[in-house]
Amino acid sequence: MTSPLREPTYFVLTALAAGPAHGYRILQAVEELSGGRVRMRAGTLYAALDRLARDGHISFVGTDSDGGPPRRSFALTDSGRELLAAEVARLRANAEVGQAMLRQGLAT
Amino acid sequence: VSRGTALRWAARRLPAVDDRLRGDLVASADELAARGGRVDRALETASLVGFALRSAGRRGAHDDRRELVRQGARTGALVLALAGALAAWVAVAGGGAGASGALNPPPVVDAGGPVAPALAALATLVAAAIAGGLRAAAVVLAAVQAAAVAGAVAWAGEPGAALALPLLVLGAVAVGRRFDDRACPGGGLAAAAGVLAGAAAAALAPAGAAGVLGIAALAVPAACLAVGWFDPRYAVAATVVWAWRLVAVDLGDLAAAVGDLADERAFRVLLARWLLMGAGVALAALVSAAAIRRSVSAFRSG
């Protein structure tokens, strides 16, 4: 059994589930998706992206130089999609257990 | 100076960042610099520095926990060897082991005569061999140094605390590994030149040199621990340095004080000091373990 994903990593993968995005867009998406609760610094984001890329969960796609160094976007790979799906299933199972216990408490 | 200069510099110039990330990182830094306030930009810059340090540690050790520890042990050995060599020269300049008391406990033996400069020269060679990445030579020289200090300790009839540093250097350099695969003669020469420059400064102003050494003895492990939060190798190095302080606080005195509880004050002082040293080692070891865990498993919790 694997350990749960860290919350910032979960939101990075969730942000990429909708489609490829570059770093700054991911930072904004993580903040939006978490309702402002998770705000990542650039160093934290790129450390997570670096690790996820090396483990094959995301890939680099496209380049957009715009005069500076080539800027790549990031996209979920099949492995990344599986990782996110597994985490979603884990969170859902936890939530269902919690909800069931709450209902049981209300019924008694 | 334009807005976000430091942030942009960090994004463009920091080493150890994967080249595939660099372009996007630079563009994101530009956008962050345009958006945030001064405090925000400073925090972003600090986070990029942390990212670069973490990447350097991870790449340097190839994601291997044992390699992180071994490289950290070698760094700790280098710090201790440099400190020991400088303390030895300060003692030579000041005419006795007491002059190196700024490094508390002093890691030199009060042997006198030509023995003290010979031990200082040997300590310099050990530091140069470690810094130069000459592992086999460093192990042999550290063993010779430990034997020589043991002999000097026995001859001078001292309790033996001075032996702790060469023994710890020997152990750390024996298990240690350098950061890269190649020897670096330039590093060895630089270390030797640095120690000899320190020796010259100590000859001119022994008290001043001892004071600087005392400050460095506190500042360097503290800096290693701070950097070690991101790059575990430096936290391990801090653990090695603090372990020396723990071991070298005179074991003989502690045993005597425990045996003679009538001298309650001396016992309390020694116990407090040992607890302080022990807390230092425990803190450095905890930071090492946490940094290694974060480094090897970056995106999962637990």
Image: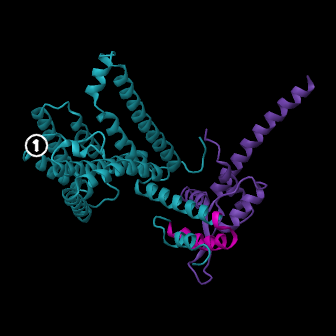
Chain colours: A purple, B cyan
Which image quadrant: the C terminus of chain B? top right
Magenta stretch: includes residue A48: no
Which residue extends farthest bottom? A67
- Name the main secondary structure of what is drawn in magenta: helix
Which image quadrant: the N terminus of chain B? bottom right
Task: State the residue at coordinates (80%, 34%).
Answer: A98
B232 or B264, nearer to the observer:
B264
**Horizontal relation, residue B199 to residue A85: left or right:** left
Q: Amino acid at mark 1?
A: Gly
Q: Say if A102 sits above or below B111 in the image.
A: above
**Horizontal relation, residue B45 to residue B86: left or right:** right
Q: Which residue is mark 1?
A: B112
State which region is magenta: B18-39
- Indicate the position of residue B165 as horizontal and vertical percent values: 25, 41
Magenta stretch: includes residue B30: yes
Res B254 → quadrant:
top left
Q: Chain of mark 1?
A: B
